[in-house]
Image: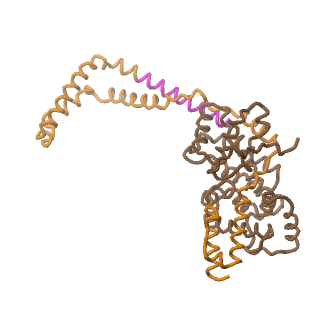
């Protein structure tokens, strides 16, 4: 079965909300199992727009014994948390483990969650901790991982030229996704949280346990690298 | 690249980080500086690409795996005993009242009569006629009420109330223990 069995529902995306149909999907298996498409799309919309009221309502329902409400949160956030975990770990199995553990921890600690704060940010913070733990475990196994940029310089060497040649294939969005995959874990996650999830720099920095200034510098460097990787020079 | 270019690019980056559209950034400088115009176009292209970038697609089994793992977790109590904290608070207050009733060897209503003595009323209050009238009517009401309640104020009833309070607190403690062990398991 192909992995890309997610339906794109771009036509339903309101014009006045950040993001677009390219990232608003309802999982096809959910629909084939009889789930209401309108509800699935509505949940995806709430998750994309970071609707705190919707999240809070779901959390309240879970705490009053409605297990299905947490399943809705899982449906809506799995792909997002997976993308974040994958950006950090670069490993599908590890990213899947991070996603599973993130939802388990969130469920167990749900009673202590402050419902006035965005559930999404809390979920990302848990996932970040778990992804960092996975990277540290990898380092202990003798596989060094550079979390951040080693230096501000980014020389165009032959290896990078090869990477750029590879990136020239495919559409712009796909090329950009590949280019982000070549960034160190923390800046890659920062780009995802800030540009794709619409978090402010402060929120993204808090989630990744960085200072706001460090996040600004990392974003600047990330953009610079992305532009170089995509074949555009400073 | 001169200072004007640097300032222009800095403003572009600030716009970019604030999530604002770069199309709105119009500056005379870009019209006269081809390098900065190219920079603007590149940033706008990058911004648009971020906007269109798809999520990584997990395997379909992942959601099912997460859900089946969550199914093994105990559900949160749907019979939320919402009344327990309030009842426990009332029980605590009642218990304190019982202890005071038996520990202090005076009539529980005596403090009111004591407070009503003229000497205990501040002089400034007596000067206010309307206020004094209000107080007088409140006192009358209170005396009527205490008179009606007096037959119920027996040691046996207070003891029963104390026992009920203890029972309620024990139930509350048992519920708290049950929730704690459920979450630990």
Is residue A101 at all visible to an observer of this figure? no
> Closest to the observer: A234 or B89?
A234
Left or right, residue A102 beside residue A181? left
**Placement of B141 over or under A167, stated as above or below:** above
Q: Give the colour in which the image draws chain A.
A: brown
Q: Position of residue B71 (x, y in %)?
A: 73, 33
> Closest to the observer: B141 or A180?
A180
Q: Position of residue A9 (x, y in %)?
A: 73, 44
Is residue A212 at all visible to an observer of this figure? yes
**Placement of A140 over or under A13, stated as above or below:** below
The quadrant the C terminus of chain A occupies is: bottom right
State the residue at coordinates (76%, 66%): A226
Q: Position of residue A47 (x, y in %)?
A: 66, 45
Q: Which residues are magenta?
A: B162-185
- The main secondary structure of the magenta stretch is helix
Q: Give the colour in which the image draws chain B.
A: orange
């Amino acid at each position: 079965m192909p992995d890309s069995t997610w339906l794109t529902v771009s036509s339903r995306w309101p014009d006045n909300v950040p993001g677009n149909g390219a990232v608003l999907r309802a999982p096809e298996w959910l629909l084939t199992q009889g789930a209401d498409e309108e509800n699935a799309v509505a949940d995806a919309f709430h998750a994309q727009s970071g609707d705190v009221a919707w999240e809070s309502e779901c959390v309240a329902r879970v705490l009053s014994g409605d297990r299905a409400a947490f399943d809705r949160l899982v449906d809506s956030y799995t792909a997002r948390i997976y993308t974040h975990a994958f950006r950090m770990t670069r490993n599908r199995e590890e990213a899947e483990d991070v996603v599973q553990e993130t939802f388990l921890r969130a469920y167990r600690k749900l009673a202590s969650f402050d419902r006035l704060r965005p559930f999404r940010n809390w979920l990302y913070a848990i996932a970040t901790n778990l992804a960092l733990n996975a990277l540290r475990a990898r380092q202990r196994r003798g596989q060094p991982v550079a979390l951040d940029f080693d230096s501000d310089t980014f020389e165009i060497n032959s290896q990078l030229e090869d990477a750029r040649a590879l990136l020239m294939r495919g559409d712009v969005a796909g090329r950009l996704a590949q280019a982000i995959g070549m960034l160190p874990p923390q800046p890659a996650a920062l780009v995802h949280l800030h540009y794709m999830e619409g978090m402010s720099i402060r929120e993204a920095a808090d989630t990744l346990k960085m200072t706001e200034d460090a996040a600004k510098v990392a974003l600047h460097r990330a953009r610079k690298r992305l532009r170089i990787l995509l074949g555009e020079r400073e | 690249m001169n200072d004007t270019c640097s300032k222009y690019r800095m403003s572009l980056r600030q716009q970019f980080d604030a999530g604002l559209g770069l199309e709105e950034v119009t500056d005379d400088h870009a019209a006269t500086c081809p390098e900065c115009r190219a920079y603007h176009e590149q940033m706008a292209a990058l911004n648009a690409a971020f906007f269109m970038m798809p999520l990584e697609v997990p395997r379909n089994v992942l959601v099912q795996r997460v859900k089946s793992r969550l199914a093994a977790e105990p559900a949160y109590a749907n019979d939320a005993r919402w009344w327990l904290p309030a009842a426990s608070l009332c029980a605590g207050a009642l218990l304190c009242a019982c202890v005071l009733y038996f520990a202090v060897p005076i009539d529980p209503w005596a403090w009111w009569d004591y407070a009503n003595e003229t000497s205990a009323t501040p002089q400034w209050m007596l000067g206010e006629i309307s206020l004094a009238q209000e107080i007088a009517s409140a006192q009358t009401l209170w005396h009527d009420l205490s008179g009606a309640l007096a037959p119920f104020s027996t040691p046996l009833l207070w003891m029963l109330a104390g026992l009920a309070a203890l029972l309620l607190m024990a139930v509350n403690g048992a519920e708290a223990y049950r929730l704690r062990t459920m979450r630990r398991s």
